[in-house]
């Protein structure tokens, strides 16, 4: 080959390589835009009535649902019904198809929560997740069963709430969520995952250590952080979720997960400390205590309601996140984390009824 022909051939080859590279870049860009558009569609659907998604977990409580709908303060509910079994099967002992129909008829999207909860022992069970996560085959089989359940009951997606996974199964848990996400997305359904709060990786105990925030955040549509249980039986009396603590958890989350996927957990319940014991509270407990025991009431720094009283000769201290306390948490969220997807509350039926108007006012 002459020098001229060699130069011409080299020039042609170089041009072809540049063209090929350009086509790859364009194709990658198209794929990225398509993926972003699909993700944006899922996010846009999350909050049809405003900027933020407002969701809540429920066992099927109708009165609370009606109150939330009347206030224009709910987009989505997660029905806590679906339970994984160690053999890979599923159980739904509280399934209520009429509730699903009611919520959907009112324009509220319905997601099913999948737990590793054992109904017989009334506890989350690490043996359930360990058996399912044991192999690629067992993970795939269970993911297939979950996806088929969603199709049968026509729900919008799955919220994975496995709370007893061991830290040693961190990789396998991520793999299972990825497999389930692939099956759900292929059927145009969403996937959420519930994670324990933490401010660094990997976390300080099995629960958070089993959850790889960065990798899970790349997989799911909703990354729900359970930003509550700051105080409990393991601590002195204190608030359920101080806004400053929530802020620190969300600060870390935004270093690991895209903000538009992050959903902040909001606790609707409180606790009562008495002696060495604690008791979970719902709003009805606040009403009864005010009626029967004339508590001393004040606001903690967290803005949560604190009630000090004596009952049957024993001193009690209770904290409850009433509507004003919830508003303080929402104000922090809007001020410090305006780009998150929204909030999710545990649990419908436990709340101060005025909370729905606060959610509507703050997030709508």
Image (cartoon, grey):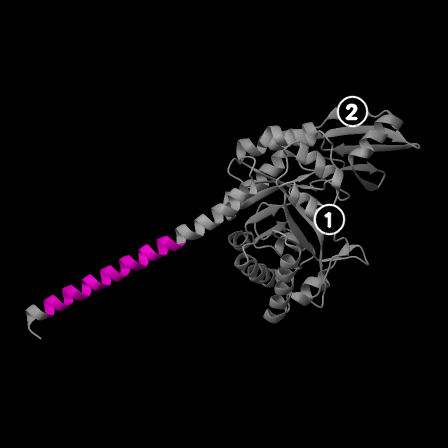
Element type at mark 1 = helix
User: Does residue 136 appear in this view?
Assistant: yes
Q: Quadrant of residue 294?
A: top right
- Snapshot quadrant of residue 342: top right
Tell me the residue at 56%/61% (across/down). 183
Q: Which residues are magenta?
A: 6-31
Whether 226 is among the magenta residues is no
Q: Which mark is residue 332?
A: none
Query: Which residue position holds label 1?
Result: 98
Which SS does the magenta portion mostly show? helix
Q: Residue at x 80, y 31 (%)?
A: 286
Q: In the rendering, at what x and y percent does residue 182 appear? A: 54, 60
Query: Under tag 2, what secondary structure?
Result: strand
Residue lying at the far right in this picture: please name it: 312
Quick one: label 1 or label 2, which is nearer the N terminus? 1
Residue 218: where, in percent of width, then height?
51, 53
The answer to whether residue 184 is left or right of residue 25 is right
What residue sits right under mark 2 in the picture?
297
Residue 69 occupies which quadrant of the picture?
top right
Image quadrant in which the C terminus is located: top right
Q: Nearer the viewer, residue 361 or 281?
A: 361
x%, y% of residue 312? 93, 33
Above or below, 212 against 285 in this view is below
Q: Quadrant of the N terminus?
A: bottom left
Left or right: residue 276 versus residue 191 is right
Nearer mark to the viewer, of 1 and 2: 1
Residue that sits furthest to the bottom in the current view: 1
Q: How many marks?
A: 2
Q: Position of residue 261 (x, y in %)?
A: 53, 46
């Amino acid at each position: 080959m002459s020098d001229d022909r060699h130069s011409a051939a080299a020039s042609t080859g170089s041009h072809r390589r540049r063209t090929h590279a350009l086509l790859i870049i364009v194709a990658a860009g198209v794929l990225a835009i398509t993926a972003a558009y699909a993700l944006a569609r899922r996010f846009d659907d999350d909050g049809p009535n405003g900027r933020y998604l407002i969701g809540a977990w429920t066992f099927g409580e109708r009165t609370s649902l009606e109150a939330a709908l009347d206030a224009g303060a709910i987009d989505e509910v997660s029905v806590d019904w679906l339970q994984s079994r160690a053999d890979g099967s599923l159980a739904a002992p509280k399934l209520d198809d009429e509730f699903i129909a009611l919520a959907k008829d009112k324009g509220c999207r319905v997601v099913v929560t999948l737990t590793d909860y054992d109904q017989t022992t009334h506890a989350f069970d690490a043996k359930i997740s360990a058996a399912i996560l044991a192999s690629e085959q067992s993970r795939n089989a269970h993911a297939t069963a979950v996806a088929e359940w969603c199709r049968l009951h026509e729900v919008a997606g799955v919220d994975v709430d496995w709370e007893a996974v061991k830290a040693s199964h961190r990789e396998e848990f991520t793999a299972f969520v990825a497999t389930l996400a692939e099956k759900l997305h292929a059927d145009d359904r969403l996937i959420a995952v519930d994670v324990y709060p933490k401010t660094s990786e990997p976390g300080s105990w099995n629960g958070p250590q089993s959850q790889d925030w960065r990798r899970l955040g790349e997989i799911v549509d909703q990354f729900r952080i359970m930003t509550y249980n700051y105080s409990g039986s393991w601590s002195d009396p204190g608030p359920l979720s101080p806004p400053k603590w929530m802020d620190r958890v969300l600060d870390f989350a935004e270093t690991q997960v895209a903000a538009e996927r992050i959903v902040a957990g909001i606790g609707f319940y409180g606790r009562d400390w008495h002696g060495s014991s604690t008791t979970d509270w719902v709003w009805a407990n606040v009403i009864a205590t005010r009626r029967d025991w004339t508590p001393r009431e004040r606001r903690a720094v967290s803005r949560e309601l604190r009630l000090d009283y004596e009952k049957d000769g024993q001193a009690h201290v209770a904290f409850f996140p009433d509507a004003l306390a919830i508003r303080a948490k929402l104000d922090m969220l809007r001020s410090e984390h305006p780009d998150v997807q929204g909030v999710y509350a545990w649990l419908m039926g436990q709340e101060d009824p005025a909370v729905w108007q606060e959610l509507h006012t703050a997030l709508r």
